[in-house]
Each structure stands twice: as structure tokens, then as C-alpha cells.
Amino acid sequence: MTDIASKPPLGTSWARMMAVAGPGIVVMLADTDAGSVITAAQSGAQWGYKLLMMQLLLVPILYIVQELTVRLGVVTGKGHAELIAQHFGRFWAWVSVVALIVACLGAILSELSGLAGVGSLFGVPKLLTMALAVLALIVMAVSGSYLTVERIAIVVGAFELLFIYVAWKSQPAGGELLKGMVNIPLSDPKYLYLVSANIGAVIMPWMVFYQQSSVVEKGLTRDDLPAARWDTAIGAIVTQLIMAAVLIATAATIGKAGGNAPLDTVEQIAGALTPFLGVSTGRVIFALAISGSAIVATIVVTLTAARTIGEILGVPHTLERSPKEAKWFYGVYALTLIAGALIVSSGVDLIAISVGVQVLNALLLPLVLGFLYLLARRLPEPYRLEGWYDKLVAVAMGATALFGVYSAVFGLVG
């Protein structure tokens, strides 16, 4: 692990922050991926502002979860799967890895389907869009270091901020917005299904694995923990502002009609988000925003799958190694992209996949958050979870996991 303890001391906070920032912002930009955008758009279209309060409540929960991954990474210098194997045995490590791979494959389909939908807006065939995306992402990984890939992800992901501009241009009525936020139909199965999808769209299994391995690969030390926490907090706020912006934009347009306006294609979502920008301008802004979200998430998800399998197999698994040195790592990275591209090109229902993937994430939360919590309680002092904060984390994580599963099951059965 690279030691960056020689960087400016904590007193020069801005310099330190700029050197440390990256893993938290990247993983949070990836959190607002194509599937999350689609889920937020469906939420606004079908329920108006009734799921907006959830976007705000999930900010502290998202921070609590991801801050623990930072602690684990900087204190132990190990990835998440490696720590599970160390403390709970290889069987449970493989169980967590299998769950992660399932979530990653679902996420890849969601991200690539978003890119395919953007291509369709401009008349580009799915197969050509997929081929170009896969080729570009493989070339980026093979030819770049970790820092290069991180910077590319931040620049591309920054286009997601355009969704905030779209929400502002939609000019939502303040009274309707506030009324919708407090009018919550918890007894409706269809509402609960989207509640589960929104929880799964914000707290995803691959985020835990990615951020922990990234702080390790970047070489962050215990002295970097305060700056890394700010990196995570800023990312958590930004990602939920973007989710809220998408929901507001759709709620302010077709969502006014109530719960009978599902969006079945990416083209329909583009039309719902951009009527006040003009057809041409709206399409370009929407295409840049959702492409940014999909590309940064694809980078994060494929790296997570490749790194985690490398961890559990004990083979090289970092971008600092050449393809010759890390064959498994680059092989899994490339195969994951290619498999996802082929499935998306086959003509499956892209919107249903995207929302369904978020519900799957919610169902996996007890396993993922359970291991995260138990590992954080095994850290050495003063980094260990204990006292009142331990209880707060247990309640927040437990409630989120249980409500996510309950919403998913009740929504599906109902």
C-alpha cells in the first residue's frame, strides 16, 4: 500500500482534502447511476412528491454506511471480502462475494441499458452503442492508473449535476411539494415497491466493497480519515440532491396526474424531464446527465467485481498492475462488460430491469450491512464502533435493512 503520510500535515486542511478526495465522491456519483435515475423518475411520475422525503432521510444513513467502509479500509489496509474471510471464514466470504457479483451483474445491465437508451434517443443502434462503450471502458482500464481512472470518473460523473438544473427549470409549486412530502401512503403495495427500489437505489452492496478497496488502493492512512469522511459526506449530499432533482422534475410535470403515469422507456423519461428545455436542448442535457451517471457507475461496478474476486482468490487485483501481471483482474473486468452488453443488446425490458435491480439491492441489505456492522465493531480503539454511536448505527442500519426487505416483499406480494 502506498504511504501518503508525507503529504501536508492535517493543519493544511485544503491541500490534504484535495489529495485524499476521490473514493467517496466517485462512489456517490456512481450511486446516482442510470438505474437510480430511472427509479427516481418512476417515483416522481407515479407518486408525485410522496417519495421526496425519503431521498432526504437517506442522506445520513448513506453517510453512516459508507463512513464505516472508509474506517475499515484505512485502519486495516484490506478489502471488504478479505476482512470477511479473516474474521468469519472463507465460506461467509464467498457468500458475500456471490451476493456482490449478483448485484454487480444486475447493476451492469442497468447502467448499459441506460447508455443504450441514450443511443436510441439519437438513432444509434444498441449493438453499436454497447460496442463503443465496452471498448472505451476496457481501453481506459488497461491504459490508466487508479488516479487516472478516478479523475475520469469524477469528470464524467459531474454531468449528473445537470439534473439539478433540470429540476430548477421545472419550477415546482412549493405548496404541492411540501404537501406531497408529508402525504405518505404506506399501506399501498405499489408505493412500498418503489420505497424498496429507492432504498436499494441509494444503498447498494457494491458501494461498500468499492469504497473500502479504493481507499486501500489509493494508499490512504489513518491520518487521512478526517478528510476521507468529508469526501464521503459531500458525496452523500450531492448524490441525494441529484436523486431528489430527478424526482422533482418528473413530479412537476407528468407526476401531477397521480399514480397512473409509468415511464416505460428511456425516451419517455427524457421527454418527461425536459419539456421546458426544448426538444433538442433537453435531449442533449438529458443524454449528458444520464450518460455521466451510467459511465461512472459502470466503471465502479466492474472494478468492484474484478477487485473482489481478485481479493478472495489471492491474486493481483489493482489498476497499478499490468494486464500481464493481473490477468484475473482484467479478465473479470472485460468479461463482465461484454456479458452485460450482449444481454442489453438482446432487447430485454430495460426499465423493468433497472427498477428490479434496485429491489434486489434492498433484499441483499441485511447480509451486506450485517457484515459491515460486525467488522466495524472489531476494529481497534479508537476506531471501533462503541457507545452511543454504536447503538445509533445499529438502529439506522437495522431499520434500513428491515424496511427495505419488508417493502420489497410486501410490494411484490401485494
Image (cartoon, helix red, strand yellow):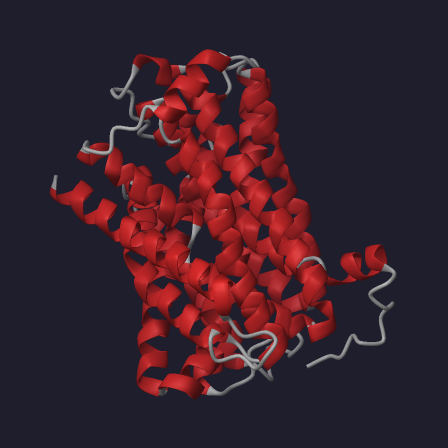
Number of numbered discs visible in the structure rendering: 0
Which x, y percent locates residue 110? 39, 47
**Dividing the image into 4 quarters, which one contains the N terminus?**
bottom right
Which x, y percent locates residue 10? 82, 65
Determine the residue located farthest toward the front in the rendered image. Answer: 388
Which x, y percent locates residue 90? 36, 86
Whether residue 252 is visible, yes or no, is no
Q: Is residue 359 left or right of residue 333?
A: left
Which x, y percent locates residue 73? 58, 73
Q: Is residue 302 left or right of residue 323?
A: left
Q: Please report the residue visible at 55 percent of the width from the left and 69 percent of the height from the top.
A: 212
Which sits in the foreground, 64 or 27?
Answer: 64
Q: Quadrant of residue 178?
A: top left
Q: Please report the residue visible at 56 percent of the width from the left and 30 percent of the height from the top.
A: 163
Q: Please report the residue visible at 67 percent of the width from the left and 54 percent of the height from the top.
A: 230
Which sits in the foreground, 351 or 215?
Answer: 215
**Dividing the image into 4 quarters, which one contains the C terminus?**
top left
Whether residue 138 is visible, yes or no, is yes
Q: Is residue 176 above or below residue 191?
A: above
Q: Is residue 72 left or right of residue 250?
A: right
